[in-house]
Amino acid sequence: MNTTPKDLLDAGVHFGHQLKRWNPRSKPYVYDNRNGISIIDLEKTHALLQEACSVADEIVASGKDIWFVGTKKQAQDIIKEVASACQMPYCANRWMGGGLTNFSTIKTSLAKYRKFLKMDESGELAKLPGKEEAAIRRQMSRMNRNFEGILNIEELPAALFVIDVKNEEIAVAEANRLNIPVIGLVDTNSDPTTVTHPIPGNDDAVKSIRIIAETIAEAIQSGLSNRESKQSSKVSKKVLPEKAFEQEEEVEVTLPEGYGDESENS
């Protein structure tokens, strides 16, 4: 991990909420209270961020995906940008209730949306009667808002990365119910015990959100590289025996001198 405590300080990750809004369970990660504001201990944030990066690297290297979730205004553009850059699914507009716990229904709706998109690309949608086309396009507009970022998913994610666990409490609760690990940016007004891997930090400032999200994304990129190297090594192992067999076929057999003379003389 290339991010240092100084980088976190410069990004304002240490600024928590006002004391009147703090959650008592965030106390272990609070360094001090100044001018009515909780100050987060960046040494602990850095250590937990490093731990979260190791977890993200391992998950992605094993061939699984991490779902980025951040629907608050400050996080939406960052989540879209960072998740797209590391080829991970994301939810940036709104969390659909049952997005994890009712995943079979979500898959059905996704298949329907993909069907509509193909009809639109082929021109088949434009050939439908006007009212029917308009109704489908309105439905597609709603689907795009709900399914942007998860259009191609086929299975549940191996983990969630969440910005503001209090704002995304439904997503966190669903993940906990299914025993899906959650990596979460947790401010002092949130309960860090609700997530598997809490990262104490400011979840309101754009700079703070960006540095945490980009650091996790770097770990995911590392995991993707490890995944590709594992896949290529598996392919090479399958190819090697075939090459060895081809080499054995090309071996020339040299008979000893005078072989077969006895049969000619008889």
Image (tube, rainbow, N blue to C red):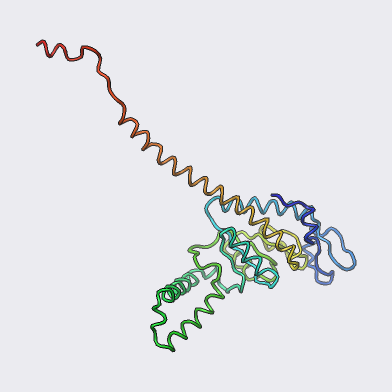
Residue 22 x %, y %: 80, 68
Q: Residue at x 47, y 69 (%)?
A: 107
Q: How many marks?
A: 0
Residue at the extreme right of the image, as rendered:
35
Q: Residue at x 64, y 54 (%)?
A: 218
Q: Residue at x 11, y 10 (%)?
A: 265
Residue 118: quarter of image: bottom left
- 238 and 17: which is toward the camera: 238
- 1 and 17: which is toward the camera: 1
Residue 164 x %, y %: 70, 67
Q: Residue at x 51, y 45 (%)?
A: 230
Residue 167: quarter of image: bottom right
Q: Relative to 133, is 209 on the left or the right?
A: right
Residue at the extreme bottom of the image, as rendered:
131
Q: Relative to 34, is 16 on the left or the right?
A: left
- 104 and 234: which is toward the camera: 234
Give the vertical position of 241 relative to 113 (above or below).
above
Residue 155 x %, y %: 49, 62
Q: Relative to 160, is 193 on the left or the right?
A: right
Give the vertical position of 105 relative to 66 (above or below).
below
Residue 232 x %, y %: 48, 45
Q: Relative to 110, is 208 on the left or the right?
A: right
